[in-house]
Image (spheres, helix red, strand yellow):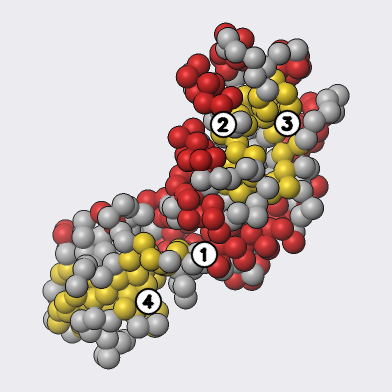
Amino acid sequence: MPRPIQAHIDLNALESNLHIARRATSARIMAVIKANAYGHGLLRAAEALAEADGFALLDIQDAVRLREAGYRQTLLLLEGFFDAQDLALVAEYDLSCVVHSVWQIALLDAYPRRAALDVWLKVNSGMNRLGFAPGRVAEAMEALRRHAAVREITLMSHFSDADEARGVSGQLELFNEVVSAYRGARSLANSAALLRYPATHGDWVRPGIMLYGASPFAEVSAQSMGLKPVMTLSSRIIATQDLSAGDRVGYGGLFCADRAMRIGIVACGYADGYPRHAPNGTPMRVDGQQTQLLGRVSMDMLYVDLSALPQAGVGSEVVLWGAGLPIELVAAAAGTISYELMCALTARVPVRM
Ligand SMILES: *Cc1c(COP(=O)(O)O)cnc(C)c1O
């Protein structure tokens, strides 16, 4: 029997979450599948999301794989091209590119062949990550418009606080002002803006996390928005230990029993992608009942509290996150976000559909 850990990827849930995005907007949907589709597997996610109007990702080789697999939608490279070689592939495979910096325009200028490239001009409206500063947009726009290799220009920006109290109004107003003089499609909204701020939808929305069934908001559950978890990480108990008061558990004795109790040893560790920094008390499910992590997560194993679960033992199923245990709760306990947990799933974890 193989080591019992597995990630179950529910492709029906992925498709159903796309429908929720669809019902929330009349804009075209650019499904964000960067980082191996947030850890869910690029090609299998694309297949479940095949009704999307486009896909956004980072790696040009992944975009090429999608084209070669037959996807004809818009494929957007979120960081654009990095060198002249990329540009040749961009032209050959008809990929759309974010253009966020002057050095990319210089690469375009040096590109020898005529082509018909669709570019997404990125405006820095306040996130200060990628994009032209508001005062530089006119210049960049001018350069792209007169460029022989450029076909269509879409105007885009990205929000820093769509999921937070600060919201989007400042960035939205600035963006609208900066681009008001130009025609061309607009794209701003990530999952949080798609769900909360219809005024940001424009022509293309770019949902990521909601498609994978996690809430972008700390205070609103995915379930309450009809989103279904796509990834369930589960394993089994492979040993148990009986503790007496004063016994310590694991490296550094991070947990110390204050009474007699029983714990289970779970075949899952940080080498599978479970966060090592998850503290005592991080939620976990054993045989369908909620319990908690105890002690420090090891490379290949972790400890679960079985005090309230006398029936549980070797072979009991343990859900680390997913069905019945929202990944956001585990992430919050571990001081991170669902995105990071999903992406961190490692290659050694067998995936089942
Ligand atoms: C990752 C990303 C998104 C998707 O964000 P979610 O919060 O996962 O919906 C959208 N746009 C850009 C530019 C991104 O980098």
Q: Which residue is mark 1?
A: 11
Q: Is residue 97 visible?
A: yes
Marked residue nearer the N-terminal end (2 or 4): 2
CA gap between label 2 and label 4 equals 45 Å
Labelled pair 2, 4 in contact (Cβ < 8 Å): no
Asked if the residue at label 1 sits under 8 Å from ligand 1, the reply is no
Marked residue nearer the N-terminal end (1 or 4): 1
Q: Residue at x 35, y 70 (%)?
A: 234
CA gap between label 3 and label 1 equals 31 Å
Marked residue nearer the N-terminal end (2 or 1): 1
Q: Which residue is mark 3?
A: 154
Q: Amino acid at mark 3?
A: Thr
CA gap between label 4 and label 3 equals 46 Å
Give x and y (percent) for residue 352.
38, 66
Q: Residue at x 47, y 19 (%)?
A: 85
Q: Is residue 161 visible?
A: no
Q: Local crowd at mark 1 within 10 Å, few (<14), some, or many (≥20)?
A: many
Q: Which residue is mark 2?
A: 93
Q: Nearer the viewer, mark 3 or mark 1?
A: 1
Labelled pair 1, 4 in contact (Cβ < 8 Å): no
Q: Which residue is mark 4?
A: 285
Q: In which quarter of the view is residue 50 placed? A: bottom right
Q: Amino acid at mark 4?
A: Arg
In the rendered image, the quadrant that contains the N terminus is bottom left
The answer to whether residue 136 is above or below residue 318 is: above
